[in-house]
């Protein structure tokens, strides 16, 4: 009678063990009773925007049976710039790899709480995307999770459904190609000859030397006026205007960083009373010119005399121009000095006039003989200083005159203000070629006029056989081509 009872006990133990094993199997994912697959779909519209810059809208569809879709990351393809992100989303720039593809950034969507069988459009549009002027098809990436804060193990992920449902998942955007544009985002500023051209906007009204910024050129999307961040090609600059014999030195071709090329070592070797520009160029875009800028001999600090010298006529004539303190103690007498010498006999200082000389003459009609084709023009940007102009004619050239007394040398002068001619007569008619220019006329000696009011000659003598002529020009006569 005892053995049957033992068999009954063994059977009971076996049944219990099988039941326990069955419960273990139920806990193993994918075994006998699998966990729910959480499918979802995503559409990003418009798929074919009309411009290379467009607002895009994302819609998420939760196709799961029981689980909410709580959060998602939308991965931005390379070459796309993101702006105007909606307040319920966050854009994080920087490379991220998902599904074996490297993207340029991530748009984070949190606290979506999309119930099973429903959809949600977080914002319309969710952000603005720009593919730059090159356009083309861009493929986005996406990842979604059940949790609202995008946390949890991979088992918390939803699975993107790319084959079923209506509408189907669509995460490609084809942008049309637009014309790229070059733009100076930092303009070149006035500089001394041979010195680095900066990009500071502080030269002008205050007449202070520029600081250490540089000209910058960007390749921009005309729809947004923003630099094309993906552009890393080269941009080149060349010099235009001013003195045609001037040379632009420095690194004239630079690689762009996030669409912007910085030119930090440019200089021009010759000052000019005419303005220069930089002309920028790159492949696939039209050339663009910068704003005008000046190359001057010298910035003149406050309360400091400054001078510049030049030589012409094969070294047989020279000229030194010095800007002297005219209003000591003033606080606005900083300026710049620029000067040019012309040995072309067809040059004229009369703006708008044709070829010719200054064509001075004596008041009594006596013909004025041009002693040399050595002309000069200078400009100073502040009317608080007087200028001293010293001209030296070497003995060899001066002795070619039959009557070579130094007192026979005179100065032919032209200015934007009326000035006193010889014999105390004031020049009044404006030059026909350029209203506001007076003269040209011969300067009187300073003993005949008030030197603080009128330009005049204060010295004519010989030094070691060389002829020396010195003239002074009060501040108001110092010309400034841009009326600073």
Image (spheres, grey):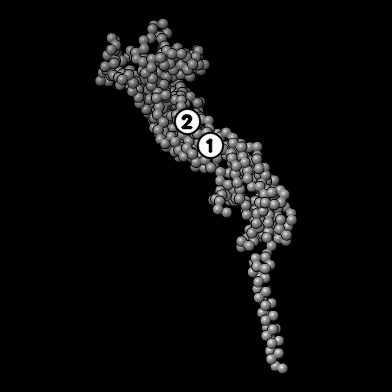
- Relative to residue 468, is residue 13 drawn left or right? right
- Relative to residue 194, is residue 259 drawn left or right? right
Q: In this rendering, is residue 298 above or below 374?
A: below
Mark 1 to mark 2 CA distance (whole Å): 16 Å
Residue 179, position in %: x, y?
57, 33
Extreme-top residue of the structure: 365
Q: In this rendering, is residue 27 above or below 109?
A: below
Residue 21, position in %: x, y?
66, 75
Residue 221 visible somewhere in the drawing? no
- Identify which residue, 126 or 74, lies in the foreground: 74
The image quadrant of residue 311 is top left
Q: In this rendering, is residue 375 above or below 308?
A: above
- Identify which residue, 124 or 316, lies in the foreground: 124
Label 1, on which residue? 219
Extreme-right residue of the structure: 117
Residue 26 visible somewhere in the drawing? yes
Label 2, on which residue? 278
Q: Residues within 10 Å of mark 2 (few under 14, many from 20)?
A: many
Instruction: Tell which circle, 1 or 2, labels the residue nearer the N-terminal end.
Output: 1
What residue is rendered at 67% in x and 68% in y? 32
What residue is rendered at 59% in x and 35% in y? 178
Q: In this rendering, is residue 67 above or below 17?
A: above
Asked if disc 1 and disc 2 are in contact, CB closer than 8 Å, the reply is no
The image quadrant of residue 63 is bottom right
């Amino acid at each position: 009678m005892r053995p049957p009872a033992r068999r009954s006990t063994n059977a009971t133990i076996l049944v219990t063990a099988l039941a326990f094993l069955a419960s273990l199997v139920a806990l193993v994912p994918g075994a006998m009773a699998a966990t729910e697959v959480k499918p979802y779909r995503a559409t990003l519209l418009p798929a074919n925007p009309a411009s290379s810059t467009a607002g895009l809208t994302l819609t998420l569809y939760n196709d799961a049976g029981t689980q909410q879709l709580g959060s998602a990351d939308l991965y931005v393809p390379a070459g796309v710039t993101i702006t105007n992100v909606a307040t319920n989303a966050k854009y994080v720039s920087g490379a991220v790899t998902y599904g074996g593809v490297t993207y340029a950034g991530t748009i984070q969507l949190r606290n979506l709480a999309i119930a099973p069988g429903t959809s949600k459009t977080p914002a319309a549009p969710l952000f603005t995307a720009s593919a730059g002027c090159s356009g083309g098809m861009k493929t986005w990436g996406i990842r979604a999770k059940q949790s609202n804060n995008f946390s949890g193990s991979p088992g918390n992920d939803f699975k993107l459904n790319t084959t079923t449902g209506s509408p189907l998942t669509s995460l490609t955007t084809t942008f049309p190609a637009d014309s790229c544009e070059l733009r100076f985002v930092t303009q070149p500023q006035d500089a001394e000859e041979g010195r680095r051209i900066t990009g500071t906007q502080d030269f002008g009204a205050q007449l202070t030397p520029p600081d250490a910024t540089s000209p910058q050129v960007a390749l921009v999307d005309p729809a947004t006026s923003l630099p094309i961040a993906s552009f890393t090609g080269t941009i080149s600059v060349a010099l235009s205007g001013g003195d045609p014999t001037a040379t632009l030195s420095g690194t004239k071709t630079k690689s762009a960083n996030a669409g912007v090329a910085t030119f930090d070592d440019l200089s021009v070797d010759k000052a000019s009373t005419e303005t220069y520009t930089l002309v920028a160029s790159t492949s696939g875009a039209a050339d663009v010119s910068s704003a005008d800028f000046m190359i001057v001999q010298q910035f003149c600090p406050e309360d400091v005399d400054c001078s510049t010298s030049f030589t012409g006529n094969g070294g047989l004539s020279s000229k030194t121009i010095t800007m002297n303190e005219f209003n000591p103690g003033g606080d606005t007498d900083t300026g710049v000095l620029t000067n040019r010498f012309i040995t072309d006999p067809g040059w004229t200082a009369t703006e708008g006039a044709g070829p010719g000389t200054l064509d001075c003459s004596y008041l009594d009609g006596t013909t004025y003989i041009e002693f040399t084709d050595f002309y000069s023009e200078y400009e100073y940007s502040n009317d608080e200083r007087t200028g001293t102009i010293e001209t030296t004619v070497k003995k060899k050239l001066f002795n070619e005159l039959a009557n070579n007394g130094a007192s026979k040398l005179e100065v032919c002068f032209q200015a934007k203000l009326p000035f006193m001619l010889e014999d105390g007569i004031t020049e009044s008619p404006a030059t026909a070629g350029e209203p506001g220019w007076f003269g040209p006329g011969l300067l009187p000696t300073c003993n005949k006029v008030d030197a603080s009011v009128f330009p005049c000659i204060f010295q004519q003598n010989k030094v070691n056989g060389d002829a020396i002529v010195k003239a002074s020009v009060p501040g108001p006569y110092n010309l400034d081509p841009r009326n600073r």
